Amino acid sequence: LRPIEEHAVAKNLVFSKDILPGDYTMLGDTDQLLNHVVGNLVNNSINYTQTGSVSVHLERTNDSILFSVKDTGVGLSDEDKAVLFTEGGRGKESRAVNPHSTGYGLYIASQIVLAHKGRIWAESEGRGKGSTFFVELPVPHIPENLKK
């Protein structure tokens, strides 16, 4: 996440990571999950946050890996949340804050997450109140005799 952290620092944002100890081994396309899904969500949080902070969290439960990124950015209305993960969908503040937004980043991220049998969603208390994006991915149970 080094370049991402530099992006946040360049905007005078507080950037924090909370990665809980655990085994994050899973089946899937690591490049797509890390570079597109995680990278897109974190970069979006930085791009849509003018002041304040961006916090990344990662934890493992018995059945899943949960990633989240929380920001103090522009926030989302219910109307925004309804279109975010659709093809070409973006929030009302999108073009004003990020003129380079195509509306396809979250759609592609959602397709990657769904292909991995996971789920992706966003929560926000409204415009101007920041948002949190979540990705939950299932972790297959590997029998003890197959673990290295």
Image: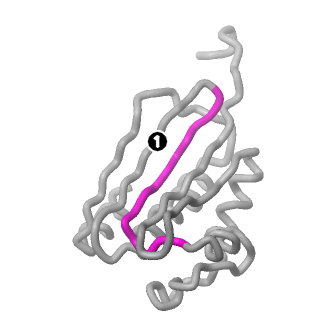
Q: Of residues 128 and 106, which is closer to you in this image?
A: 128
What residue is drawn where x is 35% and y is 64%? 3
Quarter of the picture holding the C terminus? top right
Quarter-wise, where is residue 108 in the image?
Answer: bottom right
Based on the picture, tell me whether residue 56 belongs to the magenta stretch: no
Q: Quadrant of residue 37?
A: bottom right
Neighbour tally class for label 1: few under 14, some 14-19, many 20 plus, Cα within 10 Å? some
Answer with left or right where residue 24 lies relative to residue 18.
Answer: right
Of residue 93 and residue 10, the one placed in the foreground of this image is: 93
From the viewer's perspective, is 23 left or right of 4?
Answer: right
Magenta residue span: 63-76
> For the point 39% across and 39% down, which residue is it?
19
| Tag 1: amino acid | Leu
The residue tagged with tag 1: helix, strand or loop?
strand
Q: Quadrant of the N terminus?
A: bottom left
Q: How is the image coloured?
A: one colour
In the rendered image, the vertical position of residue 94 relative to residue 109, given as above or below: below
Q: Is residue 147 above or below residue 106?
A: above
Residue 9 percent coordinates (x, y) = 25, 67
What percent of the width, then of the height, locates residue 84? 65, 72
Q: Residue at x 51, y 84 (%)?
A: 93
Above/below status of 98 relative to 127: below
Image coords of residue 56 (percent x, y): 41, 51
How many numbered discs sit on the rendered protein?
1
- Look at the image and say whether residue 73 sits in the magenta stretch: yes
Residue placed under numbered mark 1 in the picture: 58
The residue that appears at 76% across and 45% down in the rendered structure is 117
Residue that protrudes farthest toward the top in the picture: 145
Q: Where's residue 41, x and y in %?
A: 52, 62
